[in-house]
Each structure stands twice: as structure tokens, then as C-alpha cells.
Amino acid sequence: MNKTIRKVAGGAGLLAVSLALPMAAVAQAVPVTSAEVTGSTPTKMNVSNANVFNRLLKKETDPNPDPWEDGYHDPENEATHALQPPKVAYEGWPRTPFGNHVDWVKALNDGLINPRYDRVDPTVEPLVMDLDIVRPVRASVPDVVFPHKPHTEWLHCSNCHPKIFIPQKGANQINMSAILLGKKCGVCHGKVSFPVTTKSCKLCHSKPKPEDWEPPVSEASLKNPWR
Amino acid sequence: MKDVTTRLTAYWKAAALALVASVFWGVSPQPAHAEYGDVIINNYSDAAGMRPAVFPHWYHRIRFRCNVCHADLGFKFKAGGNKITMAKIIDGKFCGACHNGEIAWSVENCGLCHSGKPGTPTHIHGSTVQRLVAPTYKPVQQGTN
């Protein structure tokens, strides 16, 4: 019964489309209301506003606002207007969808910037170490590869060792909660260097799991009396 | 409308305010943001009648690598954790290592650093903790949404 109705409805739709086709040019001329353009549905008054779209999604309107419009600098302060807008500095840099919305490591490697390694002497070269540390992770996400190279291009060994990371295999317990709260990698990542977002996971979690890898099944599932 | 308002108890007023606030935050475009990594330092500024200092990490990263300030000059990785004062700066410590009229402009340009909106607390702008939907520093109340 249902099937027949659907068939009839489908046929009617096809008919409607074929009829509408010659009239497409006419239809284009019909003005569209703003509600149709934005896709918003008209809501009745006195109804709960709890069902708005993207209730908890915070979206940045302008990733690199000018200092006098950024909401933090005081526009009443005359010197604020003498500050350099970040947009000007970032012109021509590779972009990213998070953080400052520019790729600092690539900008450095491509020679777009050459920040000093010494306060006064611009000729001092950084102590770069090229050593990757692989950290297998329990979760199903790819394993972590920590590259010393881009880190030592910016930092000195003493910035991280031994206070933040003990330079010894297996000595450092790291988890995402600690990072999000500003510990371990989170001392910089999430504050100045690229932050933890869905779009940046794979920058650290970059080594695919072995072909035969299966996620460990949680004990609650193994002991599930109802399965 | 006036009748309705007068009949509302304090509880309902608070609930209505919370609803209006949540709707405002959910629907309206987010207010403008400072640059990611900007540090607003207001340990002593407000109390001294100055605007809080704003440190633009991005501007300094273009000119210096992290180690210069965070290893050589002894800046801790903590917003407000260095207890910087103007006395230390004019003695050549912290910002004063460069902002001395030799490497960078000198301290008489008060407003270039002290440019934040008064009353802004010390923090790193755009940090992950700050961006979380539910704050982590106090327990989340269940069932309030």
C-alpha cells in the first residue's frame, strides 16, 4: 500500500518537475524573501528559545582583528592606534584554520621570517636537533610523533628539559586532559603554538596504527551481561 | 507587561535573565577577539591607575625565537607569573632587557604596552581553557540547560 503511494507521489513529482522546467526562467525572476535566503525558520513568539542552531558553537568572526577593534585593546588609548595590525604582518604567509591562522613553522622554514636566536646578535644560529620520538597511544587515533626539529628551531633544550619533560624514555605520562589544562605540551600548545582543535589533531597524531591494530575493548563491554 | 514583571519572583527574574543571556550568546555573532597568544597582564596595573599591559606574542615571535625571552631572560611560561613591575623593567629585567631605547623603544611610550581595556583580568587570550564551552575550573552544574 505504502509502496503504491510512494510510486504515485514520485510520478507526480516527476510530472511537476517536467512542467516546471520550461517555466524556470520565469521562476528566477520571482523575488526571494530573506528568510528563504538565510534558511532560518520563522519561530512563533513565546516559544522556548532553547532550540537554536549551534547553541554552543563559538565561531570567530575575524581571526586577526585590528588592535583597536579586537575587544581587548582600549580604543580610547591613542597609542593603541599606533600598534601594528597582525593582518599586515601576516600578509603572504601560509594559513592555518586555528591559532593565529598562520603556519609559524612553515613561515620560518620558507624563510619568510628570521627571528633572532640571541637578544642582540642576529648571526647566532639555533641548536637544531633532528630526532623524532614516537609515542604509541591507547586510543584509536594515530600514534604521536614528536619532532625535535621544529621545536629546537624555536626553543632551547632548557625550555622543556628537565622541568616539563624528563629526557628519558617512558618517564613522561602525557594525556590530552593535562594538555588541555596547560600541562606538558599544553604549556605552549593551546596558548601560543598551535592549539588543540579537531583540525589540528593529526599534526601530532601523525603515525597511522599498524594494519592489524584493533581498539582494546573496554572491560564493561566484555562483562556486559546483556550482550 | 508591567503586571507580569511585578509578579515574577526573584528566582524567575534570574532564570529569565539567564535565558536571555544564553540566547544572546548563542545567536549573536561572537564579539571581536584579540590575537591568539596575546597576554593581558593586570597584576598591578588597575590598582596603579594604568590600563593593563597587552603583550603581543605574535609580534615578538616574528623578531625573536622563544628561547630569547623564555630561556635567556627568564620569563616563566605563565601569564602574570613573572610579577613584572616598572621598577624591574627600568633595571633592565624582563621587558627592560630590550625596551631600553637600544633594541626596542623605551619605557616613556607607556600607552603602547598599557593599552588594554581597564578591568581585564590577567590571562592569555584565546587559550584552550578559555575557549572550552564548559569551564574546567569549577564543577559543572547538571540540568541547568
Image (cartoon, coloured by chain):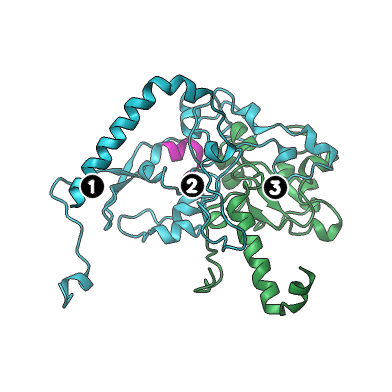
On the same chain: label 3 and label 1?
no
Q: Dot 1 corresponds to which residue?
A: A5
Q: Nearer the viewer, mark 1 or mark 2?
A: 1
Label 2 resides on the chain identified as: A
Corner quadrant of residue B3: bottom right
Label 3 resides on the chain identified as: B
Q: Dot 3 corresponds to which residue?
A: B94
For disc 3, the neighbor class at 10 Å (few under 14, some 14 to 19, many from 20) is many
- Label 2's element? loop
Corner quadrant of residue A20: top left
Letter of the cyan chain: A
Which residue is rendered at x = 82% and y = 37% of the image? A79
Q: Does any portion of residue A163 appear in the rendered image? A: no
Question: Where the C terminus of chain A falls, by quadrant?
Answer: bottom left
Amino acid carrying mark 2 in the image? Pro
Q: Is residue B56 left or right of residue B6?
A: left
Amino acid carrying mark 1 in the image? Ile
